[in-house]
Image (cartoon, grey):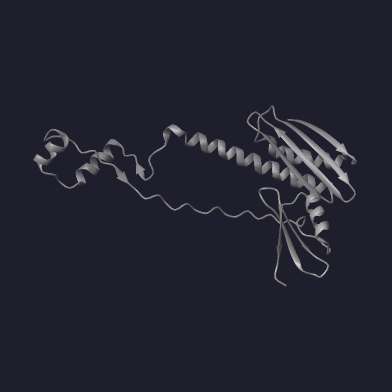
Amino acid sequence: MHVEYTARKVVVTKKLKTQAEEGLKRIEKLVDDTAKVHIFLNCEKYRCSVEITLKTKLKDIAALCVSPEAEIALRDALDKIEKQVLKLKKTIVTRKRHPQGDKLTAGTVRLSSDEARAASDKAPSVPAARKSKLNGSANGKLSVIAHSFPQAASLPEPHIVRSLDSVAMRPMTLEEALKEAHYRDRDIFIFRNRTGQLLVLHRMRDGKMELIETPA
């Protein structure tokens, strides 16, 4: 895997390179040999951002994380990339196991010839005259389709990741909170105003920030 570093206002130390190489070893096992990685590090005052771009034959994947320390931002970005690669890998495996041409009607189960014959033997007897009308002859065979109710899908186990970057450690105004949420690249940001009231900023799908006021 080819790895390229770009740093702005920060030095790519041996510690950062070792951390990146250890994280990329896990990802390298999941992608093709021609994959390329670009790691961009940028530090300004108390804010460090790490953006990782992974280019593969199937898809380009990117992750951006912000933290007061470059090591933490790099670790979070590597975790994000690994999760996206695993999700892509799982999607490809699912498509291979269940191609579109092999789809069945919902609730229908395929039976082998022996199973169909056994089901036909267990079916209630039909008068010969009626069989003749249904199948065109007295010796006609009944086609049997067995239906089953789909099983209830099991809920996936929730994956919880603890994060302190979405919480302000000091009281701040609404304008300061908006800037802080933008700097940290967070869709949800929790803070207290000068009077101690707990407020929540939530970035909606259209990009607008929603202010949620909690009861006093």
In which quadrant of the rendered image does the N terminus lie? Answer: top right
Spot the residue most to the bottom.
216
Residue at image coords 31%, 39%: 111
The percent position of residue 130, horizontal first and vertical second, equals 12, 41
Spot the residue most to the left.
129
Q: Name the quadrant containing residue 25.
A: top right
Q: Nearer the viewer, residue 101 or 188?
A: 188
The percent position of residue 132, horizontal first and vertical second, equals 12, 36
Q: Nearer the viewer, residue 23 or 105?
A: 105
Q: How many marks are shown on the rendered structure? A: 0
Residue at image coords 20%, 38%: 142
Q: Nearer the viewer, residue 176 or 115?
A: 176
Residue at image coords 80%, 70%: 196
Residue 122 in the figure: left or right of residue 102: left
Q: Nearer the viewer, residue 4 or 105?
A: 105
Residue at image coords 13%, 34%: 139
The percent position of residue 166, horizontal first and vertical second, equals 75, 56
Residue 79 in the figure: left or right of residue 91: right
In which quadrant of the rendered image does the C terminus lie? Answer: bottom right
The percent position of residue 197, horizontal first and vertical second, equals 77, 69
